[in-house]
């Protein structure tokens, strides 16, 4: 059951149950709640383009009214944090006219992560 609560990609471990992101050496990466939700959404839909509207729906639901550019700001902050800890240059890719995509494959199995 613990594996279903954990996603591995790009040498990182996203612990869904504990709501934290770890490097392979166990060092925690500080993420805000919004950044965690955004990364989780991208990781659950790896290598798939998600529009700003989809990201807003998945991370905030329809109960919150936010400007779509708030997603851009969160993506920017998340990219900066990931760039410091991940060797993959463009982990979150901007797809012009489309949205955003997590470029790394994601696994529930730590040994499958390369």
Image (cartoon, rainbow, N blue to C red):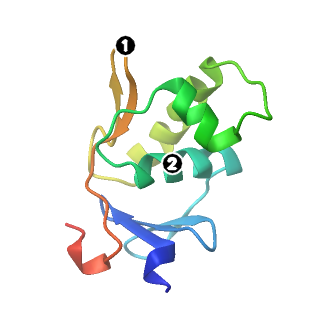
- At horizontal 37% and vertical 13% (from top left) the residue drawn is 97
Q: Is residue 66 above or below residue 93?
A: above
- Element type where label 2 sits in the image: helix
Q: How many marks?
A: 2
Residue 42 in view here: yes
Q: Residue furthest bottom?
A: 1
Q: Is residue 51 above or below residue 80?
A: above
- The Cα atoms of the two marked residues, 1 and 2, are separated by 19 Å
Where residue 66 sits, quadrant-wise, is: top right
Residue 84 in view here: no
Q: What x and y, as percent, mark residue 50?
A: 42, 33
Residue 75 vs residue 44: left or right?
Answer: right
Residue 99 vs residue 68: left or right?
Answer: left
The disc label shown at residue 97, or none:
1
Locate the C terminus by quadrant.
bottom left
- Report crowding for label 1: few under 14, some 14 to 19, many 20 or more residues within 10 A (C-alpha): few
Q: Which residue is label 2 attached to?
A: 41
Where residue 85 sits, quadrant-wise, is: bottom left
Question: Which one is in front, 33 or 82?
Answer: 33
- At horizontal 62% and vertical 35% (from top left) the residue drawn is 57
- Element type where label 1 sits in the image: loop
Is the C-beta separation of discs 1 and 2 under 8 Å? no
The disc label shown at residue 26, or none:
none
Q: What x and y, as percent, mark residue 110?
A: 31, 77
Q: Tell me which label, 1 or 2, sits earlier in the chain.
A: 2
Q: What x and y, as percent, mark residue 69?
A: 61, 18
Q: Is residue 25 above or below residue 2?
A: above
- At horizontal 70% and vertical 39% (from top left) the residue drawn is 61
């Amino acid at each position: 059951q613990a594996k279903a609560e954990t996603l591995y990609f790009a040498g990182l471990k996203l612990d869904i149950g504990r709501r934290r992101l770890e490097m392979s050496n166990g060092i925690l990466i500080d993420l805000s709640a919004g950044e965690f939700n955004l990364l989780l959404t991208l990781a659950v839909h790896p290598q798939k383009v998600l529009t700003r509207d989809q990201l807003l729906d998945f991370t905030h639901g329809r109960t919150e009214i936010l400007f779509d550019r708030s997603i851009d700001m969160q993506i920017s902050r998340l990219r900066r944090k990931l760039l410091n800890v991940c060797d993959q240059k463009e982990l979150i890719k901007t797809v012009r006219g489309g949205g955003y995509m997590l470029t790394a494959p994601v696994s529930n199995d730590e040994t499958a992560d390369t």
